[in-house]
Image (spheres, helix red, strand yellow):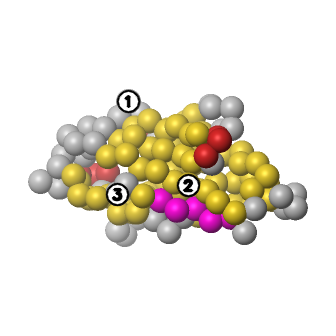
Amino acid sequence: QVQLVESGGGLVQPGGSLRLSCAASGSIFSINAMAWYRQAPGKQRELVAAITSGGSTNYLDSVKGRFSISRDNAKNTVYLQMNSLKPEDTAVYYCNAEGATMTMVDFGSWGQGTQVIVSS
């Protein structure tokens, strides 16, 4: 079992910044990709940013230049630095991780989600 716990969401004014964190714990042998998704009310969940174990990243077009994903492999933690936030960034943000457990079983886990509200 691999658990993901997110933190860092909240209410912020347009133009402000937030930093999300997601820590993975449990029977982890390795984590390959880690990613952040978001889901706004009435919309489908979408990939915001992803990062491989080697540090390669990709971003949703609408967040490029504003958001930055990073990870600390020693802590099994992924971060999402969000700057210049816009009201359209309002959503529940979910962490995702894929890898292998200590028993060499592939896993794909989701966090519980953290709410981000961008409003004046």
For the C terminus, the image quarter is bottom left
Q: Between marks 2 and 1, how big is the CA–CA gap?
A: 24 Å
The residue that mark 1 highlights is 65
Judged left or right of residue 91, residue 107 is: right
Residue at 35%, 42% (x, y): give it. 82
Q: Is residue 111 above or below residue 84?
A: below
Q: Position of residue 8 (x, y in %)?
A: 37, 54
Residue at 76%, 48% (x, y): give it. 30
Q: Earlier in the sequence, mark 2 or mark 1?
A: 2
Q: Earlier in the sequence, mark 3 or mark 2?
A: 3
The residue that mark 3 highlights is 9
- The part of the chain drawn in magenta is 2-6
Of circles 2 and 1, the one toward us is 2
Q: Position of residue 88 (x, y in %)?
A: 28, 52
Q: Position of residue 7 (x, y in %)?
A: 42, 58
Q: Between marks 3 and 1, how big is the CA–CA gap?
A: 20 Å
Q: Is residue 90 above or below residue 57?
A: below
Of circles 3 and 2, the one toward us is 2
Judged left or right of residue 31, residue 93 is: left
Q: Position of residue 25 (x, y in %)?
A: 64, 60
* Residue type, label 2: Ala
